[in-house]
Image (spheres, rainbow, N blue to C red):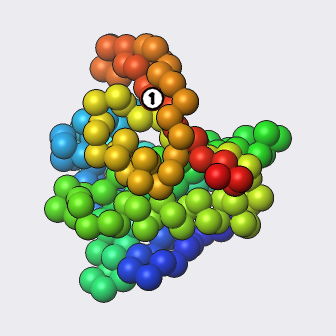
Amino acid sequence: MITEIHTERLHLRKMKVSDSSSLFRIWSDPDVTKFMNVSCFTDENKAKEMINLLDDLSRDSKAIRFSIIKKESNEIIGSCGYNSFDFENEKAEIGYDIAKSFWGRGYASEAICSLLDHAFTSLKLNRIEAQVDPENVNSIKLLQKLNFTFEGTLRQYGKVEGKFNDLNIYSKLISD
């Protein structure tokens, strides 16, 4: 499984526990976690637990998450990756988050494009999916910009903090 991807402005590197303080600063921002399937982090140990959980999943080739590092400053500005793989059906689900101070600068788009390229060329996948809260307008705009297709709404699909949430599902095929 790949551990790093480079783009023009970004270095995507498999998350490490040493990234926890940088990722905690991002994941403790309620504006960033508002549409994630986790509660806003209040303790850096939660970031370490999340990184360790994701590391276990990557060892089993079930998922892989990258820290998004801005090459110019060597600063971690978010995370992205494959939330799950289904190699039998040649598909994966992606996820991403960017620190609020870096929103609107094309970093998420650049990171996601690199994930798509890797998925379709190296992993030989046919389909990439993204599940998005219907109220997450910025993420929806990003997926539309990258020519993902809206497939529908999964009603009360997930439960966060005791409340059921709908999720919109978007996909992109290698043939798109």
Residue at the image point whose x is 19% and y is 43% from the top: 31
Query: Mark 1 packing: few (<14 Cα in 10 Å), some, or many (20+)?
Result: some
Of helix, strand and loop, which one carries label 1?
strand
**Height in image: 170 above or below 123?**
above
Q: How many marks?
A: 1
Asked if residue 140 shows in the view, the reply is: yes
Residue at the image point whose x is 47% and y is 22% from the top: 153
Viewer-nearest residue: 20 or 148 = 148
Quadrant of the snapshot with the N terminus: bottom right
Q: Is residue 112 left or right of residue 58?
A: left
The picture places residue 16, in percent across and down from the top left corner, at 46, 64
Residue at the image point whose x is 35% and y is 28% from the top: 134
| Residue underneath mark 1 | 168
**Height in image: 19 above or below 31?**
below
Where is residue 158, by image quadrant?
A: top left
Residue at the image point whose x is 54% and y is 67% from the top: 114
**Height in image: 130 above or below 100?**
above
Asked if residue 63 shows in the view, the reply is: no
The picture places residue 61, in percent across and down from the top left corner, at 70, 51
Q: Amino acid at mark 1?
A: Asn
Q: Residue furthest bottom?
A: 72
**Height in image: 150 above or below 14?**
above
The picture places residue 37, in percent across and down from the top left corner, at 38, 32
